[in-house]
Amino acid sequence: MALPPLVAPGPELTPERTARYARTTQLPGFGPEAQRRIRAARVLVVGAGGLGSAVLPLLASAGVGTIGIVDDDRVELSNLPRQSIHTPAEVGRPKVESAAEVVRELGDEVDVRLFPERLTAQNAERILSGFDLVLDGSDNFPTRYLVDDAATLAGLPVIWGAVHQTGGQAGLSWAAQGPTYRDLFPVPPAPGSVASCAEAGALPSVCGVIGGVMVGEALKLITGTGEPMLGRVVVHDALRGSFRELAYERDPSAAPVTGLIDYDLFCGVSETMSPTELNARLLAGEPHTLLDVREPWEADIVELPGSLLVPLGVVESDPAGVAERLPEDPLVIVCHHGIRAETARRLLAEAGVPGLVLAGGLDAWARDVDPTLPRY
């Protein structure tokens, strides 16, 4: 069933704006008042990657008045096929700045608010403050649960999207009106069981499809038009050219969200060493074994000097054999974001060799220790 409009109408449209949005306002259920609501809307987009690249231009072109962009990453060459808001000329530039230029060109009156930082439990309340709606295009589970919990505490709806290889999902989470992301996924998947987009790849067109669904849902909520996706998830399979829908309800036994937590710990990345701590120990000459469990093609892009490259698949097939061959120095396990490293840590610990995970992986190392390294 339809919900009341999320946003009150803004000022009357000028003749130029009336002409510009005529093809929207003539739609059944819309009209000039709906366009005024869109103009008054304040939408926060988490992530300026694949989904953000699809979402941001559509929001700007639709006439959304205020758009916030949260991302601490820089544009890399390998981003370009699926992150179409960025161009080759922007490689090395902060993604929020590159994306903001396109948003401003498409929406000449839009108020763009940039947050070139990683969303954390410490800054989430500040960043979400002043927005009506959140579109979550992040690519990792700690951030997804953080966004959902922070929005629940703030009373905001979250439209989330996820892309994995040749498929994707989109849904609406809104504790004030229906079930949330936590009702659908009460606990995160086991560490390492679902690779990130950067690790597993993504068909560029899937980002466009899921991003389009997310923006359509946003416009419906803002204007109070149509039936929102409360309690429904749209699942897209690009290889089959198909869509299907999954229904879910509130979990009556779920504990209420009363505050933000350690989301890395919640998602299973617990035995960690920070990049700055590892860097300090290496500079001090303390002995360490750095085990890199990424794939060879990833090591060709960037690696820490002195690392031993043993892909996770090899560790999974023979953890005892890998454990036997490791030096006796303290073990630090490295991957792109830390998820695969946590899987390797558990397997090697069971085989008798304890170790720590480089928190945030090489992506965090490039962010916190050596910004000259590529972040793919």
Image: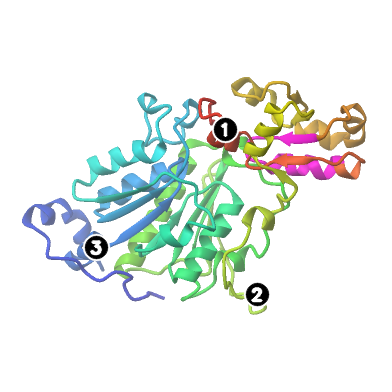
What amino acid is at disc 3? Ala
Q: In the image, which disc is placed on residue 254? A: 2
What amino acid is at disc 2? Ala
- The local secondary structure at tag 3 comes to helix
Which residue is pictured at 62% across the width and 56% down the height? 263
Q: Callout 2: 10 Å neighbours few (<14), some, many (20+)? A: few
What amino acid is at disc 1? Val
Query: Is residue 9 placed above or below 302 in the rendered structure?
Result: below
Q: Circle 3 sits on which residue?
A: 40
Residue 339, position in %: x, y? 68, 43
Query: Is residue 216 placed above or below 82 in the rendered structure?
Result: below
- Which mark is nearer the camera, 1 or 3? 1
- The local secondary structure at tag 1 comes to loop
- The local secondary structure at tag 2 comes to loop
Mark 1 vs 3, N-terminal side? 3
For this orientation, the residue located farthest to the front is 284
Residue 71, position in %: x, y? 45, 44
Q: Quadrant of the C terminus?
A: top right
Q: Callout 3: 10 Å neighbours few (<14), some, many (20+)? A: many
Residues at marks 1 and 3, CA–CA distance in whole angstroms: 41 Å
Mark 2 vs 1, N-terminal side? 2
| Part of the protein shown in magenta | 331-348
Q: Circle 1 sits on which residue?
A: 369
